[in-house]
Amino acid sequence: MSNKMWGGRFAEVPPKFVEEFGAVIKVETRLCPYDIQGSLAHVTMLGETGILQKEDVEKIKEGLKLVGKEIDDGKFTFNAEDEDIHMAIEKRLTEIIGLTGGKLHTGRSRNDQCCIDSYLYFRDAAKECQKLIIEIQKAIFEQAEKNFGSIMPGFTHLQVAQPVLVSHWLMAYFWMLKRDYARLQSFLDRLVECPLGAAALAGTDFPIDRWSTAKQLGFEKPTENSIDTVADRDYCIEFASIATISYMHLSRLCEEIIIFASQEYKFVELSDDFTTGSSIMPQKKNCDFAELIKGRTGRMYGYLQAMLTMMKGIPLAYDKDMQEDKFLSYETIDLWQNTMKVMAPMVRKMKINTRRTYQAASNGFSTATDMADYLVRKGLPFREAHRVVGQTVRYCVENDKTFDDLTLEEFKVQSSLFEEDIFNDISLEHSVEARKSYGGTSPEAVKVQMQHAERLLNEA
Ligand code: ARG
């Protein structure tokens, strides 16, 4: 007979390399504190309901705490032969307190046990991600405050579109991250039903009290269907999709930083400690970390894809395929958290060259829309005004001029409606200030969004 915990019906066990192939134990050590916490709640409930004697309950609790301490102190050895931490912890418990340890698993299965561990872990991980999101938001907000009033070109198609406040551009990322934060919150708000007590898939014939364990572990109520409970990995997929969306946001910011830090733009400069040099070209200052984040977006999308694919053909209830959720979830969480830890100081320490951004906004005819709007105010239909300004731009391009170089006479050749006041209307300041619509780029409107942002940061 094998000495495995489930060894009763086996004459032989898998050879070492096969065992290693199936083991998740070394990957999931982060679940240990949650496993102990879940077991403590479970055994407390077994005592409350009279399923276990009080002495056994106390003994098991003491033992679990000792195992927990061994793990905290780094004295616990994780062996592939134990498969997962659930079996390793129970085995160690039994070594310490004797056969009574075997009573812990009464009315429970690893199937609901691994779910409760993951729920508890995800709860902490999601809250940690929220904190890290706020750090990046603060960095963005600080930059928006520091550079308030400065102007840059806004782009569409990466072509100069209209002038915007630098703060407006920065704050765009603040609101993306706000949605990521809110998605995490609704993820947490949904994680309020306790899986413990679903047992293997069918519930249990012991008179367990699932409300007790739910309450002890900070849940509102038990889950409704034991089959669904152990077959469900929506929470892993949901978390990964939130992480993926947020990572896409971070990646876009990184790409803008990389472009804007280039010699051709010079809008921003990352601090030395968030860049690297070249082994051959002494002049180089590369945005390696921003590039890596952008590059690792591929991995992040991969984790989500892998999880969705892993789950798509699993017959109810639990199948071992689902153990893959551990590798994929931890990779997802670690990558996202580590990335956010890099992003916050990278953004905070970035320098924005507002002289350059202003200069760039003065080129590229960024106030062409304002010029058309001017003609509209003088009575020309917008389509007609669009054509006149288009021709004016062409005149400038052909004669190597910017709008600022044009004299009133040159304007008048394009349209007799142009008067002296055109010069004010096509200034960058006027263009930006005029866009007072709610959520627009005028300093007034940006101030409003920044006040709202500040309130959110203070509430968080
Ligand atoms: N280590 C397993 C997992 O993470 C725990 C559940 C094992 N259940 C089973 N029926 N083999 O998925």
Image (tube, rainbow, N blue to C red):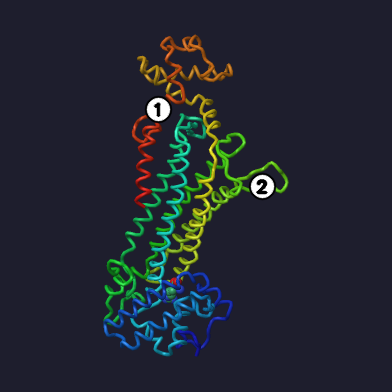
In the displayed structure image, the side of residue 17 where residue 329 appears, left or right: left
Q: Whole-percent x and y of residue 1?
A: 50, 90
Q: CA distance from mark 1 to mark 2?
A: 40 Å
In the displayed structure image, the side of residue 429 where residue 274 appears, left or right: right
On screen, residue 135 above or below 367? below
Q: Residues within 10 Å of mark 2 (few under 14, many from 20)?
A: some
User: In what element is the residue under mark 1?
Assistant: helix
Q: Which amino acid type corresponds to the residue marked 1 in the rendered image?
A: Glu
Foreground: 81 or 335?
A: 335
On screen, residue 306 above or below 277? below
Q: Which amino acid type corresponds to the residue marked 2 in the rendered image?
A: Gly
Query: Which residue is at 69% across, 41% downward?
Result: 283
Q: Quadrant of ligand 1?
A: bottom left
For residue 277, the mark is 2
On screen, residue 187 above or below 421? below
Foreground: 116 or 276?
A: 276
Q: Quadrant of residue 104?
A: bottom left
Q: Whole-percent x and y of residue 300?
A: 50, 55
On screen, residue 307 above or below 270? below
For residue 433, the mark is 1
User: In what element is the residue under mark 2?
Assistant: loop
Q: Whole-percent x and y of residue 329?
A: 46, 63
Q: Is residue 267 visible?
A: yes
Q: Quadrant of residue 218?
A: bottom left
